[in-house]
Amino acid sequence: MRDTNSMRKRIARAKRADSAMTGVFYSVGGFFLLLLLVLAGYIISKGLIDFYPELLTFTRQGIGNQFFNTVYLVFLSLVISVPLGVAAGIYMAEYAKQGKVTAFLQVCIESLSSLPSIVVGLFGYLVFILMTGATWNLMAGALAVSILSLPLITTTTKDALISLPKGYKEGSMALGATHWRTITKVLLPACLPRIITGVILAAGRGFGEAAALLYTAGQSTNINWSNWDITSTTCPLNPFRPGETLSLHIWVMRTEGSLNPNSTAIANFSSAVLIVMVLSFSLLARMLTKRINKRMGGLQ
Amino acid sequence: MTAKDTADKRATEQFARHMSRKGAFGRGLVTACGLFIILLTVSIGVFLIVKGTGTFTKYHHTIWEFLFSADWAPTDTPNEGGGTVGAAIYIVGSLLTCGLALLFVTPFSLAAAIFMTEISPKAGTKIFQPAVEIFVGIPSVVYGWIGLTVLVPFIRDTFHARMGGYSVLAASIVLAVMIFPTITTVAADAIRSVPLDFRRAAYGLGSTRWQVIYRVVVPAASPGIMTGVILGLARAFGEALAVAMVIGKTRAFASSLLSPTNNLTAAIAADMGNSSNGGEQNLALWTMALLLFLISMLFIFLIHLISRKGKEKHA
């Protein structure tokens, strides 16, 4: 009798603990959703409250130049890292044999992806600025960002190729296509959406990157929008001119606040613009993934 | 065989040769790109080692001094040593902020991961997963800026901290928010991959959901959760600008959570541009970068160790 009683008590205690913990989990989950909403809402509304029309101009009081630099730098970095990353991904998925070299390559990719971005920035500073004798320039920044996005694009390509149904390759090979032709005409087109998703994610990270650009792209920008001589250092399209990006601008506005009376407003608005850009890029990647899943679901 | 047949055969052979040449070229190209990644990684390592060991070889400081002395007064004239390069303040600053951030965030991350996988999987995939992904995407400078404009004044006004709120506490909270999505995603993946049978067996024995979670699911997923924690720690260690904005950058050990200090990444970010190339200060900063590189290698090694152990256990 006593035994059943104590058993009943134990069960009651376990049930109480269960419902208490369920409550804890719900509140933690709710807390984080709330935190994100408040954070995103705060950043965007703060940027809009301090808004003044000159913010949209290409002057010292605006962020037009920094916005252009950011987009241009990410574009340059993708031009470098996408072909390299996709090719390396193809190598890993299709040609690399199991062995020491492949295992080492895998470790290298993991190391690259976990390198602190300030360390990559220093490497870029040493190799692209000091060793070439150049001043801060967009190209050096783009190369540094490429180092950061290379592992992501390589891994995405490799995973996409590996997860394709075997029939794709077998069908193409059975028709007499060479391995290379199978890769370029069948396999790559089939995993293009997934690779694009990876590239969008890499671009999103590039927009927010700052530490790697501190000593490569430089912390100032001087663009003359009527100058289209590409060799001139004030020409917008010259990749070998200093080009401060939006995220770096937030950092610079903090340290040089006394020089610019609008620095807080500029940093607030830059943060809001960055958040909106990152949000739309992650939404885009999400929509693409959804469509791929739907199409793949239809196939199977 | 007619003349046409021979011509056809020759054309086919030619095409096949053309194709195989193209294939060989393509294969060479992608192999070169794969090898390029190895070359890139190795050269980053080599450059860091060459530059970073200069403190010990060129200016004859000991590793002991660099790691454990708090006496930081390197000279900035090229080729003229004689200063001191004790980086203990920066190292302790990094360890302290990252450790605290981990302490703050691990319970929350674990709870969030359990919530999105075990308690409410539907809301988990539909709402929570995208939300966490957005967290990942917020640039670190923006986190730093929020810390500077919200957290620092808050700490100043609530705790009346000296140095106006720039503190270890502010840096740890900023880092904690930054690494939350990393730990949560990896931990959630680990929990999801625990076989369903484990749960069924536990429920069959009459366990409540909480008992299933803390006695069966979390222990089974622990290698994956550890991996998430280490990845989060790696991200926290490498973060530069967000921390630099709120840590106060004073060259002293933190006497309390509310006092400012400095860390490795913030010191590199702030001083590298003002130091003359090859000088004692410059090389000491490179040694710090080398230390960061070695720490991130250590983290990768640990992750491999954990996953190997986990595989052994399952096999």
Image (cartoon, rainbow, N blue to C red):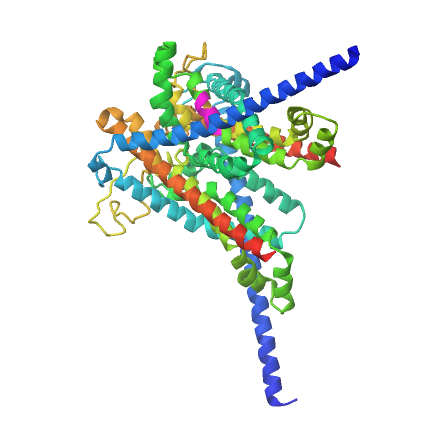
Q: Position of residue A257 (x, y in %)?
A: 26, 25
Considering the image in quadrants, where does the N terminus of chain A appear?
A: top right
Q: Is residue A53 visible?
A: yes
> Residue most toward the bottom?
B2
Residue B74 locus on image (x, y percent): 41, 20
Count of numbered marks: 0
Was residue B176 drawn as part of the magenta stretch in this picture?
Answer: yes
Asked if B290 appears above or below B153 in the picture, the reply is below
Give the x, y percent position of residue A94.
61, 55
Screen quadrant of the C terminus of chain A? bottom right
Q: Which residues are magenta?
A: B173-179
| Residue A168, percent from left and from top | 61, 60
Query: Measuring 26% from the left and 45% from the top, which residue is drawn there?
Result: A233
A125 lies above or below B262: below
Q: Quadrant of residue A264?
A: top left
Residue at x-position 48% and y-position 20%: B97
- Give left or right: position of A53 versus B210: left
Vertical side of A220 occupied by A82: above or below: below
Q: Main secondary structure of the magenta part?
A: helix
Q: What residue appears at the point 47 percent right and 27 percent down from the top-left corner? A: A32
- Residue B75 visible? The answer is no
On the rendered structure, is A259 left or right of B253?
A: left
Locate residue B8: give its quadrant.
bottom right
| Residue depicted at 26% across the width and 41% down the height | A64
Magenta stretch holds residue B153:
no
Left or right: A92, with A2 as reference point: left
| Residue closest to the eye, B29 or B139 | B139
Q: Nearer the viewer, residue A202 or B81?
A: A202
